[in-house]
Image (cartoon, rainbow, N blue to C red):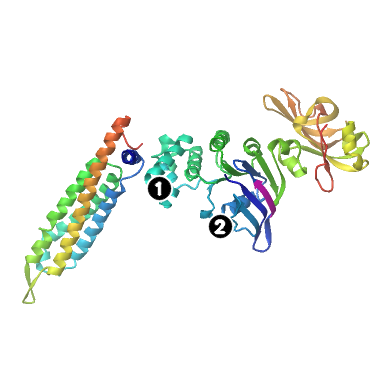
Amino acid sequence: MKQETDNQIAVDRMRYTKNKFSSNMAILAILFNVFYFVNIYKSDVSDYYYNILIGGSIVFNLLYLLLAFLASEEVKQYNEKYCYVLIAMGLVQFIRIFIIPMQAHSAVVTIAKVERQVMYTSQFMRCVIYLVLSGACCIAGGIVGVKLSRTLKAYQATLGEEKRRD
Amino acid sequence: MANLVLQHIEKIYDGNVKAVHDFNLDVKDGELIVFVGPSGCGKSTTLRMIAGLEDISSGKLFLDGKDITQFPAKDRDMAMVFQNYALYGHMTIYENMAFSLTLRNEDPNVIHKKVLAAADILNLTTQLNKKPGQLSGGQRQRVAMGRTIVRTPKVFLFDEPLSNLDAKLRGSTRREILLLHKRLKATMLYVTHDQTEALTLADRIVCMSMGHVQQVGTPLELYDHPANVFVASFIGLPPMNLFDVTVKGDHLEGKGGFRAPLDEKQQKTLKAYDGKEIILGVRPENLVEGKDIDVKVTSNENLGMNTLVHGHITDGNGTFDRITCKLRGWCNYKSGDIAKVSINRMHFFDKETTNSINGEEK
């Protein structure tokens, strides 16, 4: 009975408190993404990197940072749509593993008549770990956000409130 | 229970500047004490010493019998409301009110209950998701009060909380504080320079000047029996009229043919002062239209129910002491007119010490 009451209070509390968990997860995802691109751009940029892929990745990283920040602010306010955006961004981070890091790890370039790997295993592992962490944070934040947003929406419906904030 | 005792409290700043002299007070549980006095009289310093925001130079401070003189502010179980609200602009009202409890790692559900209860008391429930910048001054001050209520401290301290509000809002917020006090039955110390606030709110008033306590008493005691000329002139609006007069047996004589008869009781009180100069105090509301004193009018202010008549005592040839009369009804004196008034109550003060001469009532 007490547990039930505590849960009710916890739900009521959501009317006045922010979804800090999801928001912080999105910020953490940004942080890991920063670690990722710091790692990837420190590769030896020889022929391999001088293609459109690296330019696209820079633009994507910038857009990712902006969108993740926007999502962190919106999920804080229990905006369910942005929770889905966050989940989608997390999935994209996993897909990214198979684009630059994986390709660069398997690619070989010739510099001064010496063949070498574009991305060594240690660097590849770091990039993968950061993308996985970033993606996991996004997905965790998004899933928790969806759950909380729906709970709050249902609770507000019982109170006759339509909008959480003025 | 929250019984606060101040024993010989003094505040001495660098350079031997004494801001508070030998302050003694026993605040009973649930009492609302108002410190009143002009700017620089030491009332805020005293409050800050009680709160722990200023060191006590000498003396002792007891809360419920426990010596808390050396306790840091956070351990004194007191909460303070500041004149400038001191709210966090980036936090919502809910977060502002919950902040102190969050810092103490209280259970979020308990915090929630306390914040909602305080918001309900202060009629802030619909504002909880707003930021302080979206609220009016009065609402912000209520939030500042709410922040103290959630802590359920032993003593509430208010440092001129209404000074930033306009006159209308000040009146309504003042009434809210009074209702809050009645509802919480908490011990409260309130600092103001506004005597109206002091008279309307206080269970007891501490009137201060130049770091000294001038008088401690109920609002009625301070109004009816001021201990000295300072209290007499500070409490009451418009301030009390003060005249230098000489005791002449059965009457008083002043400049400009001023003559006020004394009854037997007053003659007895002033027996030791016969032939000497004293200060006569007469409140403007204790002057009525009559025949004893001629007043050459300089201005006439109609307040609706009353009229304030300002002028000088005159003997027909010259003008002497300034005098203000609060006459009943609507008067239409022009500048230069002669208004005839009588005194229906007098206060006597020793000219050297400026202290009240007891038994002054007529």
The label on residue B71 is 2
For discs 1 and 2, the disc positioned in front in the rendered view: 2
Q: Which of A122 and B185 is in front in this view?
A: B185
Residue at position x 27%, y 34% in the image: A154
User: Please, what is the three-letter code of the amino acid marked with disc 2?
Assistant: Phe
Residue B341: x and y in percent read 82, 27
**Up/down of B312 relative to A99, above or below:** above
Closer to the chain start, of discs 1 and 2, is: 2
Choose top left, top right, bottom left or bottom right for residue A146. Answer: top left
Is B44 included in the stretch rendered in magenta? no
* Residue neighbourhood size for the residue with mark 2, other residues' Cα within 10 Å, grouped as few (<14), some (14–19), many (≥20): few
In the rendered structure, the answer to whether residue B147 lies left or right of residue A81 reads right
Q: What element carries label 1?
A: loop
Residue B73: x and y in percent read 53, 55
Examine the rendering and report whether any part of residue A111 can be seen: yes
* Residue linked to disc 1: B90
Residue at position x 20%, y 57% in the image: A133
Do badges 1 and 2 share one subunit? yes
- The answer to whether marks 1 and 2 mark residues whose Cβ atoms lie closer than 8 Å is no
Residue B348: x and y in percent read 83, 39
User: Please, what is the three-letter code of the amino acid marked with disc 1?
Assistant: His
The label on residue B359 is none
Q: Nearer the viewer, residue A8 or A92?
A: A8
Residue B5: x and y in percent read 64, 50
Spatial CA distance of label 1 from label 2 is 31 Å
In the rendered structure, the answer to whether residue B51 lies left or right of residue A67 reads right
**Up/down of B338 relative to A48, above or below:** above
In the rendered structure, the answer to whether residue A166 lies left or right of residue A115 reads right
Q: Pick the quarter of the image with the N terminus of chain B.
A: top right
Principal SS element in the magenta part? strand
Instruction: Point out the stretch of residues depicted in magenta.
Output: B21-26
Q: Pick the quarter of the image with the C terminus of chain B.
A: top right
